[in-house]
Image: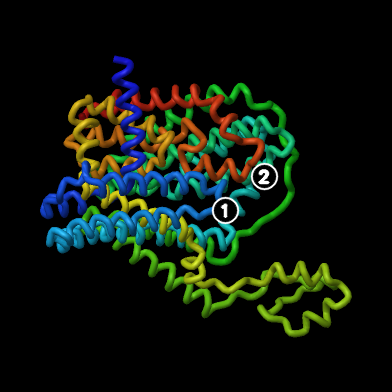
């Protein structure tokens, strides 16, 4: 029994690691109509597996090789479809291969547009010092290490419900490093806590993480039902945090006395982002249109506001002259500044900090994580090819045809500690198993929080390892993996206890 369990787990890790995003619904329907050839035993099938595994290994070792992860993945995806199209063309069925590729491309387009708008808003909020304002507020309150441990954890939990886990983890990580510069133990444990919180927070919100976003857009779980995972997600965070709490130093860090006002338009952009999320939700729930369409409408909110900001430049925030201390309302551009501050460069530097930089929404689009977006293109299109060949059908038969779905979904969560959770979830969606809504919620939970068991299991962990080098490491996280696993098991138990109506 044990050997069979281990063999099943290894197969899940290998196959799901190979079988990444294909953004399921449209692809499954399209492939059913196309009736693809079974190439799982063909040399082309074997070659596509080798290509995908090799590209994925390069992507996982990006920090070692300095090779951007999108490059090998896009290359592999392109070659995979060249091989597939060659086989179909030789049999006079090139049209079928083209239709299958377009299904994958359409699926990626929806995901791309949704993430692009979300990232643009986050970049705009960062430009307006929204996150910096939060950081300074925390640093100025003279919290104890233990208080800060819980505050950053729960802030990461709720912020990640609307932001991606990587952005959330890096934001909280900057606070942790600033407050814990004299306490390495605090930094290590708080970083672990933030990773767990960021992954847990995204698991109960339809737009909090790539896993929930994909499940929502596929339509297997209604929007409101995701929030039934809130309590299991809190348990996933709170149980390991309660244990780690007793190992946090009791001291208080030195308070920081500084002020960081939010730039003009920051509050409005936050409101517009919330309105954009509401728009996307309404598009899906009431109009049966893709959430990405609602997000694109929401992007126009920011574009019009950007136009307003450009046409109404703010005056300098300075109300006194730094040289004399006398009241003075300065224009945005002061042509006499060089003469007035010629003998006082420090005052000139201080004055320049008050001048508002032009706000242009298109610069926020240009500054997106294009490497990540192109990486998802490579992964989704490549898995569309692997699914078209027939490999995901083989995995689905073994995973959900021969095993109990509860066991399968728990193993999927454990596998997400080794393979990216977005990859895992998209592979499951592409398989389209016939399981209850309770099981879909279970796999959403396990795939979302399972990556917390290892530091390399999520983007949040990988990002924090780079930010807190030498203090938060793979080994330091691994020491607490048993505690994190307790939270993983407890969250599953709580899900069955309070969400039994979905099974």
Tell me, yes or no, if residue 270 can be seen here: no
Figure quadrant of the N terminus: top left
Instruction: Give the number of the disc on residue 131.
Output: 1
Q: Residues within 10 Å of mark 1 (few under 14, many from 20)?
A: some
Above or below: residue 147 compared with residue 379: above
In the image, is 62 to the left or to the right of 325? Answer: left
Q: Position of residue 225 (x, y in %)?
A: 27, 40
Q: Quadrant of residue 203?
A: top left
Above or below: residue 221 compared with residue 266: above
Where is mark 2, residue-wise? 139
Nearest the camera: 293 or 79? Answer: 79
In the image, is 499 to the left or to the right of 319? Answer: left
Element marked by disc 2: helix
Residue at point 76% right, 71% down?
320
Outermost residue toward the top?
1
Q: Position of residue 458 (x, y in %)?
A: 46, 40
Residue at point 16% right, 52% down?
31
Residue at point 17% right, 58% down?
88
Nearest the camera: 467 or 130? Answer: 467
Element marked by disc 1: helix
In the image, is 448 to the left or to the right of 432? Answer: right
Outermost residue toward the right?
343
Residue at point 20% right, 40% down?
393
Instruction: Give the number of the disc on residue 409.
Output: none
Mark nearer the N terminus (2 vs 1): 1
CA distance separating discs 2 and 1: 13 Å
Above or below: residue 115 compared with residue 400: below
Q: Position of residue 155 (x, y in %)?
A: 52, 41
Q: Quadrant of residue 414?
A: top left
């Amino acid at each position: 029994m044990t050997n069979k369990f281990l063999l099943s787990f290894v197969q899940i890790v290998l196959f799901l690691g190979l079988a990444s995003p294909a953004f399921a619904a449209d692809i499954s329907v399209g492939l059913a109509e196309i009736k693809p050839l079974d190439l799982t035993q063909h040399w082309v099938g074997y070659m596509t597996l080798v290509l995908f595994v090799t590209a994925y290994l390069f992507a996982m070792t990006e920090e070692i090789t300095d090779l951007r992860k999108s490059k090998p993945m896009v290359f592999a995806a392109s070659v995979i479809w060249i091989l597939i199209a060659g086989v179909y063309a030789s049999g006079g069925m090139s049209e079928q291969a083209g239709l299958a590729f377009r299904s994958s491309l359409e699926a990626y387009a929806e995901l791309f547009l949704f993430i692009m708008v979300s990232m643009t808003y986050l970049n705009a909020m960062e430009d307006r010092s929204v996150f910096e304002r939060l950081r300074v507020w925390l640093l100025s309150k003279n919290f104890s290490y233990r208080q800060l441990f819980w505050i950053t954890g729960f802030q990461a939990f709720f912020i990640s419900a609307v932001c991606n886990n990587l952005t959330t983890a890096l934001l909280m990580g900057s606070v942790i490093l600033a407050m814990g510069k004299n306490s390495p133990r605090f930094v290590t444990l708080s970083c672990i806590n933030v990773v767990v919180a960021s992954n847990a927070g995204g698991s109960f919100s339809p737009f909090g993480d790539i896993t929930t976003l994909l499940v929502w857009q596929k339509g297997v779980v209604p929007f409101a039902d995701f929030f039934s995972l809130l309590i299991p997600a809190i348990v996933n965070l709170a149980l390991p945090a309660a244990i780690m709490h007793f190992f946090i130093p009791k001291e208080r860090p030195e308070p920081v006395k500084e002020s960081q006002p939010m730039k003009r338009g920051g509050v409005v952009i936050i409101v517009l982002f919330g309105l954009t999320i509401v728009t996307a939700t309404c598009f899906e729930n009431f109009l049966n249109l893709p959430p990405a369409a609602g997000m694109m409408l929401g992007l126009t909110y920011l574009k019009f506001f950007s136009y307003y900001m450009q046409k109404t430049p703010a005056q300098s925030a300075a109300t006194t002259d730094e040289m004399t201390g006398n009241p003075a309302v300065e224009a945005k551009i002061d042509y006499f500044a060089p003469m007035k501050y010629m003998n006082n460069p420090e005052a000139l530097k201080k004055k320049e900090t008050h001048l508002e930089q032009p706000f242009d929404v298109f610069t926020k689009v240009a500054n997106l994580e294009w490497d990540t977006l192109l990486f998802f293109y490579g992964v989704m299109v490549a898995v569309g090819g692997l699914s078209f060949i027939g490999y995901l059908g083989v995995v689905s038969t073994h995973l959900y045809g021969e095993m109990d779905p509860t066991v399968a979904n728990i193993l999927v969560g454990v596998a997400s500690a080794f393979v990216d959770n977005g990859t895992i979830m998209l592979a499951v969606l592409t398989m389209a198993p016939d399981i209850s809504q309770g099981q879909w919620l279970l796999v959403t939970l396990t795939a979302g929080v399972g990556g917390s068991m290892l530091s390399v299991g999520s983007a949040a962990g990988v990002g924090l390892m780079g930010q807190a080098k030498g203090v938060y490491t793979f080994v330091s996280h691994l020491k607490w993996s048993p505690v994190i696993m307790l939270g993983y098991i407890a969250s599953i138990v709580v899900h069955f206890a309070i969400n039994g109506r979905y099974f």
